[in-house]
Amino acid sequence: MSAKKSNPISVVTGGAGFLGSHLTDRLLAEGHSVIAIDNLITGNLANIGHLVGNADYRFIKHNVSNFIMLPEEKIDYIFHFASPASPIDYLELPIPTLKVGALGTHNALGLAKAKKAAFLLASTSECYGDPLVHPQKEDYWGNVNPIGPRGVYDEAKRFAEAMTMAYHRYHKIDTKIVRIFNTYGPRMRLRDGRVVPAFIGQALSETPLTIFGDGSQTRSFCYVSDLIDGIFQLAMSDFHEPVNIGNPREMTIKQFAEEILRITGAKSKIEYKPLPVDDPKVRQPDITRAKNVLGWEPKVQFDEGIRKTIDYFREHLKDS
């Protein structure tokens, strides 16, 4: 890695993941040198294959729940994105999920303190749990079941936010917190259990689309380039409270399934199965703070973003 003296140096934990890899691309495009760290428990080297040979990029295979040792004298930004991030992952990896939210965040913040770097935490709309307030604003404290199957992710991220604010207040670290709402786009894992890859994969293989519950629960889908744009703007800001980044365009899961069938032209039926424990009934960001503080709002229309995502999965289904 031959970072120029003037290049900002950014560390991205979870750098081989869906969001981490897209963030890396944006940072490199903005003139940063990037050190990506990932233990590949859910990340994928295919997401960063295009960066092989880039002099401003380095990949380190490491579990950030263990101490992070980086010899670089100067690091300017740390983006903490390492975490399993789908319901299937929480069920299969409950303890690693808790550890990366607690120990991983502590280690990444410790690195920020040692290097005097700015720190951005990738938090989540899951901090709001199954919300009793709609849409969700950043000052809502949430309705979370700490001992349910989703609690390992929800509470790990809530703890990570508390740790981040403690480092900001006590150690005067320049910290940012982004609460990420449902995001979709190329490089999602086909079988990660989330609704976008699940429905697209089922439609492209002409198998039934599986809806859990009656399909009336809502989600709001943000295209990945919009999300990364908001995250980059937040990282460059001097705002320290949590900020929702997501697309407030809300639709029911049933409507989403019908859209996937319409766009793919699939003849798949829809099957209904029981709703999982603690599955949120509504999810819609209030993005007033992002608009006011960052001047950010999503630009990519759903039809455009979902077609790009379908094209990606159509191409990768051939290889699987």
Image (cartoon, grey):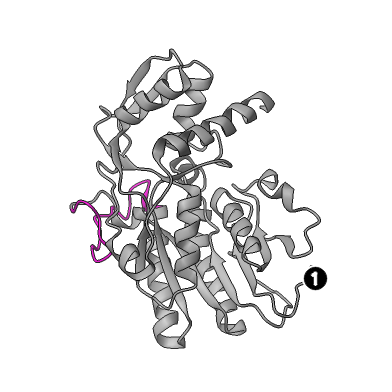
Task: Give the quadrant of residue 210.
Answer: top left
Q: Is residue 67 visible?
A: no
Task: Assess disc 1: are there few (<14), some (14-19) or many (≥20) residues with their C-alpha within 10 Å of its C-alpha.
Answer: few
Residue drawn at 18 percent across, 54 percent down: 133
Residue drawn at 49 percent across, 73 percent down: 236
Can you identify the residue that label 1 sits on?
A: 2
Give the residue type that dot 1 points to: Ser
Could you tell me residue 222's position as x and y percent? Answer: 41, 46
Image quarter (top left, top right, bottom left or bottom right) of the N terminus = bottom right
- Residue range highlighted in magenta: 133-152
Could you tell me residue 6's position as x and y percent? Answer: 70, 79
Tell me which secondary structure the magenta stretch mostly adopts: loop
Task: Give the quadrant of residue 39.
Answer: bottom right
Which residue in the rendered view is the most extreme toward the bottom? Answer: 171
Instruction: From the viewer's side, name the closer residue of 265 and 256.
Output: 265
Q: Is residue 317 visible?
A: yes
Instruction: From the viewer's side, name the closer residue of 90 and 262.
Output: 262
